[in-house]
Image: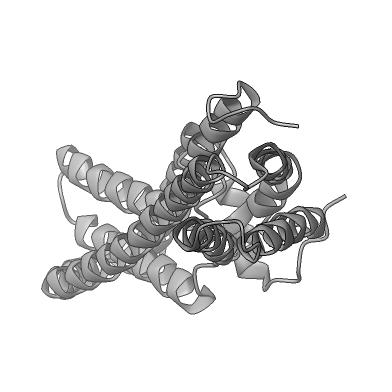
Amino acid sequence: MIDVPPRPPVARLVRWLAARSTWELFGIALVWFTVWTVVAYFSLDAIVPSDRQENLSGVAGSMMGAVGGLFAFLTGFVISSEWSHHRDAQSAIGMEADSCVRLAWASAAPHCDGPAIRTDLAEYLRSVLADEWPRLVAGAGSAPITHDHMTVLQHRIRRIAADPDVAPTVAGDLTKAADAISVTRADRSNAASHDLPSPLILLSFVAGIVLTLTTVALALRLDSGDAVVVAGIVVVVALDLALLIAISAPFTGSVAVNSGPLSHVLTALENERYGPIA
């Protein structure tokens, strides 16, 4: 059982939605906005008298550009920011894998007890994939058992680096690689615990609601064939917000980062491509 830290209701809802598949998430967004648009249309048509609907359409038309621009700017900014965060998370995983490779190669130097280092490194990677990764998906942060494996690895590296028989350049390579693994692991954990701020989510959602409402008000006096325009705006708003949610949790959902780089290093260690392990 993974203990997930408490989050605001909006953040919990967003994480639940982000964990859905792409088709589920887009379907939920489309159904919700379609229902909302239909209800808003019939409600306005019933509430606003026929002789006032033309005036309402005129007001909506004058507001359409401002509301649409606000929604496009807001969601564009948030999507760009979240995608950058998503890319940084995948980059951190790649750099962690690179640091593991550097440590594996450095362990082949004389007097380094390479098999022991590579064994500890393999145990650490197994724990990352088996114990820590599910916690990252749930947004629960790093795993204590993985931290213990990291501690064993770090202590061994520092004992070996302090051995006078180990060349200073080799000792430097070992400690730099070990330090890089520790730093990139922290970056990975921080990226997994990131939540899209609730005010931004709510503001983006409200902006989408207002945009569709403005479109409905504008469509009250339009011909039935112009419903295609309304439908197009509803689809764009729904998919835009669905994409925003899909990339808000880098380790969750169908567009999540992958553990492939770390898995490849572990496979290479187990196949003894960097040298024998204990």
Vertical relation: 219 (above or below) 118: below
Locate the C terminus by quadrant: top right
**Lateral position of residue 109 relative to residue 69, left or right:** right
Depicted 23 relative to depicted 152: above or below: above
Residue 61 visible somewhere in the drawing: yes
Q: Kindly identify the residue that appears in the image at 54 percent across and 41 percent down.
A: 104
Viewer-side residue, 272 vs 39? 272
> Taking the image as drawn, is residue 41 in sight?
no
For residue 147, side relative to residue 77 (left or right)? right
Vertical order, 58 against 149 (above or below): below
Judging depth in this view, the residue of 88 and 212 nearest the camera is 88
Q: Nearer the viewer, residue 216 or 19?
A: 19
Outermost residue toward the bottom?
A: 199
Q: Identify the residue shown where x is 73% and y is 39%.
A: 130
Q: Count all numbered tags in the image, as a single digit.
A: 0
Position of residue 28 measured from the top left corner of the image (x, y, whole percent): 52, 43
Q: From the viewer's side, name the closer residue of 151 and 264.
A: 151
Furthest residue in direction top, as rendered = 271
Quarter of the view holding residue 218: bottom left
Q: Position of residue 22 (x, y in %)?
A: 47, 36
| Coloration mode | one colour
Q: Position of residue 188 (x, y in %)?
A: 54, 59
Q: Is residue 213 left or right of residue 188?
A: left
Which residue does the image show at 68% across and 69% down from the upper left? 9
Q: Residue furthest right?
A: 1
Q: Position of residue 12 (x, y in %)?
A: 66, 62
